[in-house]
Image (spheres, rainbow, N blue to C red):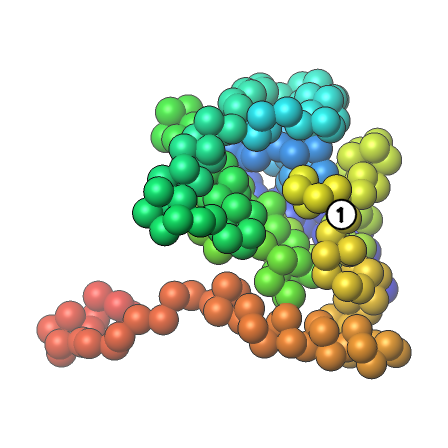
Amino acid sequence: MFDAEKVKNDIIAWIRDWFEVNGKGCNAVIGISGGKDSSVVAALCTEALGKERVVGVMMPRGYQFDIDVARALIDHLGIRGIEVNVGEACDAVEKQVEAAFGEVSVQTKTNIPPRVRMTMLYATSQTVNGRVANTCNLSEDYVGYNTIYGDNAGDFSPLSMLTVQEVKAVGRALNLPSMFVDKVPIDGLQGKTDEDNLGFTYAVLDRYIREGVCENPVAKERIDKKHAMNLFKMRTMPKFEYELEQWRSLWQ
């Protein structure tokens, strides 16, 4: 049985401990979309560090129809909010790719914005003496529904071991309004929901992750395939092991 109240308190304590060791006095820098993950991470950091040490960065690409939700979250938590439009930066990268290769693939167009946004988060972090929060959850990571060196980057990750349903439960334990916890995520490209793109619901995925049960064989096959294809995103970058004896002690 998932104890959301206990997990919430444990994460808050973990964030405090992490900052004590890895960024004493630093600020938490969070990309704010208005969705459940960034909302819950922002609320957890606010509880752990105080609202004066949390910076929410909104990064629309041109026009973002639901930017008001992100602004409402910042107002709700009382944290510092920064809004930077990444449209021109994304367009510039796309233009250079097209000039070099003659075309820009759909996958390239999909992944440029998250990587540009992460660049902006680190630029903000180094400007405000911060540490960047990763906002990915276990469900999305499990099937690779993230962008490597984009939204799957960061300095600390409060939610990466929690499924979507568990993240929502923690959000409710934090007393976040439903507009932040239950907001249906969409891809921002074709107006499709995340679940439309994945081909299965998060409820089905979460049960499979936690219980190993998936009653729909088509969904199970799809989940297994996505998981196998994207395992590299969840692992530390492989490195060629070359060690001289005198250096060995430095890595132990």
Residue located at (73% from left, 79% from top): 221
SS label for mark 1: loop
Residue 43 screen position, x and y as percent: 68, 34
Is residue 139 found left or right of 1 in the rendered image? left
Residue 177 visible: yes
Q: Nearer the viewer, residue 11 or 137?
A: 137
Q: Nearer the viewer, residue 223 or 213?
A: 223
Q: Which amino acid, by three-letter code, is at mark 1?
A: Lys
Location of the N terminus (image quadrant): bottom right
Residue located at (39% from left, 49% from top): 102
In this picture, is 174 found above or below 165?
Answer: above
Residue 97 falls in image quadrant: top left
Location of the C terminus (image quadrant): bottom left
Residue 57 falls in image quadrant: top right
Q: How many marks?
A: 1
Residue 59 screen position, x and y as percent: 56, 29
Residue 47 visible: no
Residue 114 screen position, x and y as percent: 52, 43
Is residue 174 found left or right of 108 in the rendered image? right
> What residue is disc 1 on?
192
Is residue 204 found left or right of 70 in the rendered image? right
In this picture, is 202 found above or below 29?
Answer: below
Q: Nearer the viewer, residue 143 or 236?
A: 143
In this picture, is 165 found above or below 72?
Answer: below
Residue located at (54% from left, 54% from top): 107
Residue located at (26% from left, 68% from top): 251
In this picture, is 87 found above or below 191?
Answer: above
Dot 1 alpha-carbon crowd within 10 angstroms: few under 14, some 14 to 19, many 20 or more: few
